[in-house]
Amino acid sequence: MKKKIELLAPAGNFEKLKTAVLYGADAVYLSGQKFGMRAYAGNFSDNELIEARKFCSLNKVKMYVTVNIIAHNNDITDVEKHLAFLNDIKADAVIISDLGIVDLARKTFPKLPIHISTQFSAMNYGTVNFLHGLGAKRIILPRELSISEIKEIRSRSDAELEMFVHGAMCMAYSGRCMLSFHTKNRDPNKGECNQTCRFRYDIASKDIPEGFYIEEEAEKGTYFFNSKDLCLIEHIPEIIESGVASVKIEGRMKTQGYLSTVVKTYRDAIDLYYKDRKNYKYDPEWMTELRKVSNRGYTEFRFSDAALPADQNSTSGKAESTHDIAGIVKEIINRKHLVVEVKSAFHKGDEIEILIPGKRTLNVKLDEIKNAAGDPVERTNPNQTVLIRHCKSVVPGSIIRIRK
């Protein structure tokens, strides 16, 4: 029997790590404060990495650490020190894109598993087998591959394969872009991207054929560089049957509300498949859930080999959602009150949803809100701690959502 596919979630900081694990991730990927591709995600100090390793071990969750910058000469000495530290704390793998760092890790720390980052753009089985031959245990495939290409790679390689199933996409091949460096002097390949591609541009070219869709957007500007978000929730059976080892969610800079909803949705779909493969049926409610959190519209991109450029292009630079994350349940007092850390304002009388790990979502009308001193309040404020009436099955870490 094949090993169950791994659900891999992002962890931008310790609170997000806890959220990812609570809502069903089998593994997490995170970064130290240097050498990862999300320099502004919060990330983990060395002491936090030690604690994260302990937390993951306790919860039987794998911890992969990104060391996936494209390194310059002056990075190598410090990268080697960082790899030594990750080897000492027994990280389950390091995610690397630079061949020099791959060689350094393989020769100096042979027991430290290596995963090749999607940044490497391993687009074919020849490249995958070459990297596997260098000592890489797993190859993280580019988003630009279709499922038929992934299946062929699987049939021709013994390497573990990982693929993205959800989240933001880059306008460049697997993130190898220099746009924000040219506009803001921030190097995307060292984790400093400011997402210049999401901005509006006015593009004019006499060489573009008449009728090309950029021309049609000329009056309002174009978001040609700005992709919709990837979403493959409808294709879970085919993805599992393709033989990939891990499915990955993008989003180390996303909120706990995003993480909880997306991880839980994919967890539910994967678990349903393994519970009853023959009678598995896609649930449209999963897509409804995914639209509740921040997204730029969804696309399947190259999955089916039939995508057109316009299928990926976003018509706005702004991410949207149908719901706000109103708060996070921090603790329960005597089964009478939920202690809530407020993220966005809500009022007495509002209809809320409570997303509970491993359980159905509760719909609740707020008939009572109290401040930390126990006094009734009509309206909450962000960063405030409040009390609401206890609801059955709610646990710490549950997410409160409210329709916009």
Image (spheres, rainbow, N blue to C red):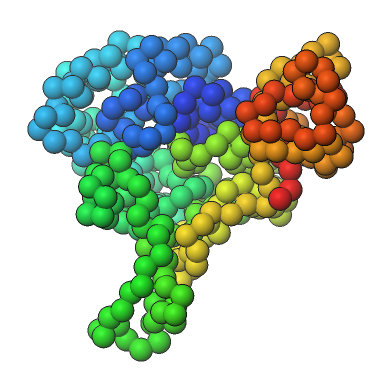
Give the farthest residue toward the right.
367
Q: Position of residue 393 (x, y in %)?
A: 81, 24
Of residues 162 and 132, the one nearer the viewer is: 162
In the displayed structure, does residue 363 sit left or right of residue 382? right
- Quadrant showing the N terminus: top right
The quadrant holding residue 192 is top left
* 275, above or below 52, in the image: below
> Does 80 sit above or below residue 320?
above
Identify which residue is drawn at 32% across, 49% down. Answer: 175
In the rendered image, residue 210, in percent from the top left (x then y), is placed at 35, 89
The answer to whether one can see residue 281 in this image is no
Which residue sits at x=25%, y=19%?
A: 82
Q: Position of residue 134 (x, y in %)?
A: 20, 33
| Image: 64 above or below 244 | above
Residue occupying image coordinates x 37% and y 63%: 225
The foreground one among 89 and 109 is 89
State which quadrant residue 45 falls in: top left
Q: Nearer the viewer, residue 240 or 167?
A: 167
Label count reads 0
Q: In percent of the image, x 56 and y 16: which residue is there?
A: 59
Rendering coords of residue 328 (x, y %) = 67, 28
